[in-house]
Amino acid sequence: MGQKVNPLSFRLQVHKNWNSRWFAGKKDFAKWLAEDIKIRDLVEAKFASRPTIARVEIERSANLITVTVHTAKAGVVIGRGGAGITELKKDIERVASLPVRINVEEVRRPELNAKLVAENIARQLERRANFRRAVKMAVQNTMNAGAKGVRIEVAGRLNGAEMSRREKTIEGSVPLHTLRADIDFHAARALGPNGTGIIGVKVWIHKGERSDA
């Protein structure tokens, strides 16, 4: 059997960091963890119609929860006159146990974000696009944006085929065992048309080697 490790958790404390940053005792840990999951699900569901959310970071202090939303389209999250951010804050405060502050940071190059690339491919597959075309376009855009390498795997009943299979595309170098290599990874799911089941999409993007690792 293959021994597979998530490339992000493999590099924690080398040059990656946790998306939730807080410390809790036994009494509060489970409650705060459940809160973080609800907050992330709420943000993702609110902007589910278009893949714009790259990452949601949560930091807790004694009397405040800071939620940082990394997005490809800051204007969509903020809304007209800040109405979107106000509504999002109210929604989060319904599930949070402390007052909430929201920061919005724009992702300058969404083609180098594995989550946005994977979700973009998944949405295309749900619209019955040819998987080879969708993957090829994603690889080209990512390499043109300055990536050192990209690897994309799609698995399931591709193009509505009777038998499920796995297809893999690799461009450039993606050194998964090199800790100083800055690898971004995400796995997304697409609901196949006409009851053809789930199609899995995995994306690895190599952004270069980090000198601070």
Image (cartoon, rainbow, N blue to C red):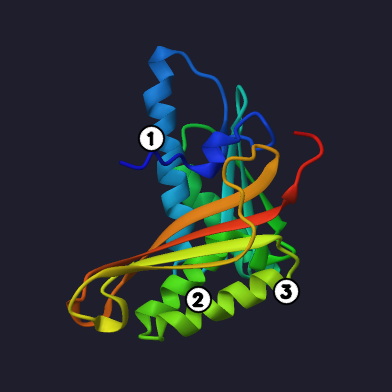
Q: Amino acid at mark 1?
A: Ala
Which residue: 44% across, 29% down? 32
Estimate how packed mark 2 is, as few (under 14), some (14 to 19) or many (20 or more) residues with alpha carbons within 10 Å.
many
- Distance Cα–Cα, label 2 vs label 3: 14 Å
The residue lying at 42 percent from left, 41 percent from top is 4
Camera-side residue of 1 and 9:
1
Q: Which residue is mark 1?
A: 34
* Residue 103, horizontal then vertical, whole percent: 68, 49
Q: Say whether disc 1 or disc 3 marks the residue closer to the N-terminus.
A: 1
**The quarter of the displayed image where residue 174 is located:** bottom right
* Quarter location, residue 164: bottom left
Residue located beneath label 3 in the image: 144
Q: CA distance from mark 1 to mark 3?
A: 39 Å
Q: Earlier in the sequence, mark 2 or mark 3?
A: 2
Q: Mark 1 against mark 3, which lies toward the viewer?
A: 3
Circle 3 crowding by C-alpha within 10 Å: few under 14, some 14–19, many from 20: few
